[in-house]
């Protein structure tokens, strides 16, 4: 069986190695000088390989088309992923949130393990971009690259999405699939920073830890979690915000805002006692100078403004109603969200090849026999925590196994 894999990212590397390991003659086409460019920067260069959890937990972290992944995850689970890399010389460790990383904290070790495995099982690597799929009378015959056609019995498209285009994810797979009749769900950024209408200039650079962020869609509570976030010149970023963005899919037709609980460890009654204690210490001070022990200095002017208390009012003149307004601001620091940063800045892309046109049991196209898809090119994406890489490993493994079968 002659198999061509397009794309040397996580899904493509897994697909190519698996197909070759099961007897296929495999050629991998990669436009970059080296494979694994996006893997190299994953997890800030540490590579969050997967999440140490069961299959159901993975599916709970996939907001788009999770049922499509049952067969892929059933055949190659997070436990299988961990076993694979351990057996291929990459010791792993589990950190907060069950995130799995190489013990070395080096993404290069993951790439090297995959590359060494592919060479051992005989995968041929072509450093060349593919121009198109070669289809004659509805039958797949290979790929077109550099002015010639390379014949193949099976082709696996694992070109990634449209995020981080500098790594080679330029949306080519969408073009290939659309040209042969597949439906493309419009790609949008996910796991990406958010834009607020007027930016957050006065708060730019301020990082908040141990806060709770809640997303509202047209006033309805949509999602909430605890963690870290960052204010930027354009709006909001940081781990919590990236996760929040995955739930915000309908800008233009829906209105979004977020609320930040600046003191999630304290209920309102306990926080009010804390305010009374602080106010007693600073009863003769201006109100704006009484919050230093409660909030980061950079955040105080914004909180004071939202509370609508005169910053120069003496603390001992602040009324119970005004204190209640301050309390509400601390527990519900509200920001409108006008959109997301561009897809080129996103960690992953939501959208892609419609999974209705792909067999979940094989990853084969329902339109073009012999054509397979794997990874981010499909309309499946997940939250942060290693789940998107798990999708790549699982769909790549299944596509490789299916393509190798005679």
Image (spheres, rainbow, N blue to C red):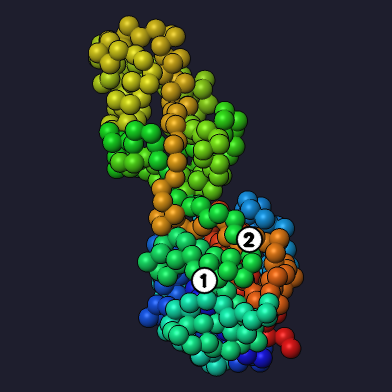
Q: Quadrant of residue 363?
A: bottom right
**Category of crowding for the residue at label 2, using alpha-carbon neighbours closer than 10 angstroms: few (below 14), some (14–19), many (at least 20):** some
Q: Is residue 37 visible?
A: yes
Residue drawn at (51%, 22%), measured in percent from left and top? Answer: 268
Say the numbered circle drawn on residue 159.
1
| 364 versus 143 height, above or below | above
Residue drawn at (37%, 40%), measured in percent from left and top? Answer: 235
Query: Which marked residue is nearer to the observer: mark 2 or mark 1?
Result: 2
Residue drawn at (39%, 36%), measured in percent from left and top? Answer: 196
Q: Position of residue 97 (x, y in %)?
A: 54, 54
Q: Position of residue 292 (x, y in %)?
A: 29, 27
Q: Could you tell whether 207 is left or right of 269 in the image?
A: left
Q: Position of residue 152 (x, y in %)?
A: 61, 87
Q: Which residue is mark 2?
A: 183
Circles 2 and 1: CB distance less than 8 Å? no
User: In the rendered image, which quarter contains the N terminus?
Assistant: bottom right
Q: Could you tell whether 296 is left or right of 151 in the image?
A: left
């Amino acid at each position: 069986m002659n198999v061509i894999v397009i794309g040397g990212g996580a899904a493509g590397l897994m697909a190519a190695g698996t197909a070759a390991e099961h007897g296929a003659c495999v050629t991998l086409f990669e436009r970059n000088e080296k494979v694994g460019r996006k893997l190299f920067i994953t997890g800030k260069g540490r590579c969050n390989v997967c999440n140490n959890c069961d299959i159901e937990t993975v599916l709970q972290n996939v907001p788009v088309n999770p049922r499509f992944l049952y067969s892929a995850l059933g055949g190659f689970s997070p436990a299988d992923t961990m076993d694979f890399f351990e057996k291929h010389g990459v010791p792993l460790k589990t950190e907060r949130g069950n995130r799995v990383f190489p013990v070395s904290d080096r993404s290069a070790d993951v790439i090297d393990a995959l590359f060494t495995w592919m060479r051992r099982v005989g995968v041929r690597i072509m450093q060349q971009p593919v121009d198109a799929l070669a289809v004659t009378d509805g039958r797949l015959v290979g790929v077109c690259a550099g002015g010639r056609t390379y014949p193949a019995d099976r082709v696996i498209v694992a070109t990634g999405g449209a995020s981080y285009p500098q790594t080679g994810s330029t949306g080519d797979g969408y073009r290939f699939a659309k040209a042969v009749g597949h439906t493309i769900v419009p790609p949008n950024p996910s796991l990406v920073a958010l834009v607020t209408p007027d930016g957050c200039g006065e708060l730019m650079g301020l990082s908040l830890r141990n806060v709770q962020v809640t997303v509202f869609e047209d006033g309805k509570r949509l999602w909430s979690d605890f963690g870290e976030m960052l204010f930027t010149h354009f709006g909001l970023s940081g781990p919590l915000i990236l996760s929040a963005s995955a739930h915000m899919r309908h800008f233009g037709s829906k209105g979004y805002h977020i609320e930040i609980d600046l003191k999630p460890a304290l209920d309102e009654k306990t926080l009010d006692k804390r305010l009374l204690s602080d106010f007693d210490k600073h009863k003769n001070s201006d109100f704006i100078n009484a919050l230093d022990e409660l909030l980061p200095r950079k955040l105080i002017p914004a909180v004071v403004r939202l509370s609508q208390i005169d910053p120069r009012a003496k603390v001992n003149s602040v009324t119970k109603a005004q204190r209640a307004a301050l309390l509400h601001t601390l527990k519900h620091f509200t920001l409108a969200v006008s959109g997301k940063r561009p897809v080129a800045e996103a960690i992953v892309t939501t959208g892609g090849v419609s999974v209705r046109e792909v067999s979940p049991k094989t990853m084969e196209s329902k339109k073009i026999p012999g054509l397979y898809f794997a990874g981010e090119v499909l309309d499946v994406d997940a939250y942060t925590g290693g789940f998107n890489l798990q999708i790549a490993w699982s769909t790549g493994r299944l596509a490789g196994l299916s393509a190798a079968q005679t």
